[in-house]
Image: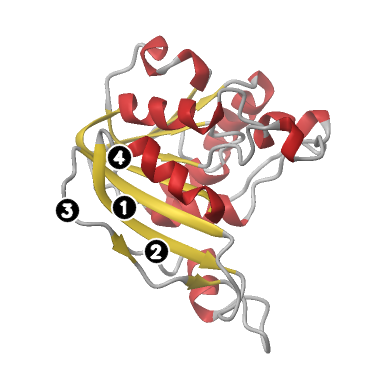
Amino acid sequence: MRLRQKPDGYRAGMDAALLAAACDALPGQRVLEPGCGVGGALLAAATRRPGVTFQGVERDSAAATLAAENAALNGLADRVAVTRGDVEAGFRALALPVFDAVITNPPFFDDPNALRAPAPAKSGAWMADGGLAAWTGFCLKAVREGGTITIIHRADRLADILALLAPKAGSFKIRPVAPFADAPAKRVVVRAIKTGKAPLVLLPPLVLHDREGGKHSAAAEAILRGEADLGW
């Protein structure tokens, strides 16, 4: 997959790759990504999931334009569409039918006092104006009953994610993502089902790096090369 990105803006990386690998939509289904940026996760997921239709939503006009161009660059324009929209305006403002699945990588911070201000070109990707509640609320409205919501976020926000989704979603599966086998997880990938009732499942962690040897662990390398999914 080829991806054109702004030289002075947020750059898609590991989180986008893991989110794409966590998408388990089936052929014929429709998937939404709010805050898709230039399409890093959106297009990687579309590449992994032939037969699935994807819709990206992005409030930054330059990023949305790049995402649409990147879809064409990768021969995915027939299955990937991008529209301008703001999560804070709510899902109904898009006037779209509900989706089978939502994948998202919300901005990691919603308190400007808790983080040294990033460069202006990156602030929209790092700071969530409406907080995590706006993103989870958007996702819950955007997905049908029985549909899935998949979120990658900081591990220290796991309790908040579960609390915000729990009134209307359940059947949680949580995949911790740790930099090393002997280090605490820095990320979590959370998959929930709207109206799901099954018990929560805490899955084995994905370990990204070996202390000795290659740059990535064998499991992480397989995911990054598209040879494996982040299975549920």
Label 1 – label 3 distance at C-alpha: 18 Å
- Please, what is the three-letter code of the amino acid marked with disc 1? Asp
For the point 44% across and 69% down, which residue is it?
227
Image quadrant in which the C terminus is located: bottom left
- Please, what is the three-letter code of the amino acid marked with disc 2? Asp
Task: Choose mark 1 or mark 4, whichever is in front.
Answer: 4
Outermost residue on the bottom side: it is 212
Label 3 – label 2 distance at C-alpha: 22 Å
User: Does any portion of residue 50 appear in the rendered image?
Assistant: no
- Please, what is the three-letter code of the amino acid marked with disc 4? Ala
Total labels: the figure holds: 4
Q: Which residue is mark 4?
A: 166
Question: Local crowd at mark 2 within 10 Å, few (<14), some, or many (≥20)?
Answer: many
Q: Which residue is mark 1?
A: 24
> In x, y percent, where is residue 86?
53, 18
For the point 60% across and 37% down, which residue is it?
107
Q: Secondary structure at mark 2?
A: loop
Asked if residue 132 is positioned above or below residue 191 in the image, the reply reads above
Q: Is residue 174 left or right of residue 76?
A: left
For the point 73% across and 31% down, which residue is it?
112
- Please, what is the three-letter code of the amino acid marked with disc 3? Ala
Query: Which label is found at residue 229?
Result: 2
